[in-house]
């Protein structure tokens, strides 16, 4: 990973794939700028594997700049078609810095002069650059911990649903102990949170007479209950950080067990108990239950992406790892068939995706699963 200095970022007035990032830089909004290695400028992207692979052909010692600077200066080349961008990378205190960026001809005309003694103060990283890097590294650490926490919440929620659906379809609760948020997400002095999620399922076959769902179908009345929910914010410190954790917990679990997006934040199907618990009542179709069972039982990401799903009127199966990645990164789901899709509240009469049904793990799952009778 190579870090561009703030001066370099301010000077890059063109070439951005995401112009909103350029706007943040122009406005000095460093806090909302994404991680520097995620910036969309080709000159910056070209440098991001420098630490791991400095011997790649796109990296070469710039002799003239090195001679003037008195220490190694590496030229990084944007390898796209055309003259492309060029960047100068130096290593200072063990950190790789991008200290000069220009298009091909201007780069070679100016790079050596950037390292002349009178220009070093405007070229090498400053204390502000080092502070920004420190803050972004800390931000990345917290983001990584948050994603790991979300993934464990999803895993335990799916496991509880599977246990309730497979073994206790008469409404008996299955209780899952949810992990406490990482300490870095909590306010100083806030206690760790032991929060339980109780999942219960009542499953029955029904006959639907009219509409798109006509025929024999099946419905599951699923209840998910958060113990001591009303006390959660207080135990987390009654702060904006606590509110964020509460919202994050809901928006991590609800998209897994309830794909009706309107319920995720407005809670129309939720009610509080006298003990302070929060309960969501969910009506789930047979196919939706199959989707969740498949995700609960199958880990490992899907193979190569095949692009956007071509049919919206089918059910897709997803693995647990792909479900975790989609919710944590807030991106479309990648189905077992390899296509990307945005979840919707499909009627139970919609068929399983033909391509998903051809996948070996889906075939084995459908051969083994028994969902009609207890």
Image (cartoon, grey):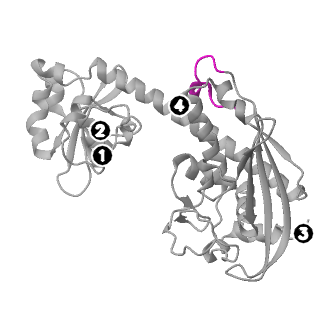
Q: CA distance from mark 2 to mark 1?
A: 6 Å
- Asked whether 71 or 257 is in front, the reply is 257
Residue 350 vertical position relative to residue 5 in the rendered view, above or below:
below
Is residue 57 in sight in this rendering?
A: no
Q: Earlier in the sequence, mark 1 or mark 3?
A: 1
User: What quarter of the picture does the N terminus occupy?
Assistant: top left
Lower sequence index among marks 2 and 3 = 2
Residue at position x 73%, y 57% in the image:
282
For label 2, the crowd category at 10 Å Cα-Cα, with few meaning under 14, some 14 to 19 and many 20 or more, is some
- Separation of marks 4 and 2 at Cα, in angstroms: 22 Å
Mark 4 and mark 3: span between their CA atoms?
A: 45 Å
Crowding near pointer 3: few (<14 within 10 Å), some, many (20+)?
Answer: few
What secondary structure do most residues of the magenta stretch adopt? loop
Q: Is residue 343 visible?
A: yes
Instruction: For the C terminus, give its image quadrant.
Output: bottom right
Q: Does 51 sit left or right of 199 as displayed?
A: left
> Residue 301: where, in percent of width, then height?
61, 55
Whether the magenta-drawn stretch holds residue 157 is answered as no
N-term-proximal mark, 4 vs 2:
2
**SS at circle 2:** helix
Q: Which residue is mark 1?
A: 20
Quarter residue 82 falls in: bottom left
Image point (51%, 63%), residue name: 305
> Which comes sooner in the sequence, label 1 or label 4?
1
Residue at image mark 2: 24
Q: Is residue 235 above or below residue 175?
A: above
Task: Indicate which disc, 4 or 3, sits on the residue closer to the N terminus.
Answer: 4
Query: Which of label 1 and label 4 is nearer to you?
Result: 1
Q: In the rendered structure, which segment of residues is drawn in magenta?
A: 180-190
Which residue position holds label 4? 142
Residues marked 1 and 4 touching at CB (< 8 Å): no
Q: CA distance from mark 1 to mark 3?
A: 54 Å
């Amino acid at each position: 990973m190579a870090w561009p200095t703030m001066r370099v970022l301010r000077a890059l007035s063109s070439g951005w794939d995401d112009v909103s990032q350029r706007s943040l830089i122009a406005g000095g909004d460093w806090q909302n700028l994404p991680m520097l290695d995620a910036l969309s400028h080709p000159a910056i992207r070209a440098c991001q594997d420098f630490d791991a692979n400095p011997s790649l052909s796109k990296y070469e010692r710039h002799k003239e700049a090195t001679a003037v600077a008195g220490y190694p200066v590496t030229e990084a080349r944007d390898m796209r078609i055309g003259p492309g961008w060029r960047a100068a990378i130096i290593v200072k205190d063990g950190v790789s810095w991008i200290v000069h960026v220009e298009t091909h001809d201007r780069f070679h005309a100016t790079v050596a002069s950037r390292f002349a003694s009178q220009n070093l103060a405007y070229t090498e990283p400053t204390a502000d650059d080092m502070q920004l890097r420190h803050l972004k590294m800390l931000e990345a650490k917290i983001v990584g911990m948050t994603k790991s926490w979300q993934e464990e919440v999803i895993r335990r929620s799916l496991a509880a649903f599977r246990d309730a659906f497979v073994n206790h379809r008469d409404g008996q609760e299955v209780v899952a102990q949810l992990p406490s948020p990482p300490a870095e997400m909590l306010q100083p002095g806030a206690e760790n949170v032991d929060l339980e999620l109780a999942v219960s399922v009542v499953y029955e076959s029904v006959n639907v007479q009219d509409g798109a769902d006509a025929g024999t179908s099946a419905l599951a009345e699923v209840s998910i209950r958060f113990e001591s929910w009303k006390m959660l914010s207080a135990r987390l410190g009654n702060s904006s950080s606590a509110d964020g954790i509460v919202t994050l917990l809901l928006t991590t679990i609800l998209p897994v067990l309830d794909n009706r997006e309107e319920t995720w934040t407005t809670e129309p199907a939720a009610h509080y108990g006298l003990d302070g618990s929060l309960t969501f009542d969910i009506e789930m179709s047979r196919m939706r239950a199959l989707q969740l069972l498949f995700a609960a039982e199958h880990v490992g990401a899907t193979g190569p992406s095949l692009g956007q799903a071509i049919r919206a009127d089918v059910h897709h199966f997803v693995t647990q790892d792909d479900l975790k990645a989609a919710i944590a990164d807030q991106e479309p789901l990648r189905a077992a068939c390899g296509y990307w899709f945005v979840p919707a509240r499909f009627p139970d009469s919609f068929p399983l995706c033909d391509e998903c049904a051809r996948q070996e793990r889906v075939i084995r799952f459908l051969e083994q699963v028994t969902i009609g009778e207890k």
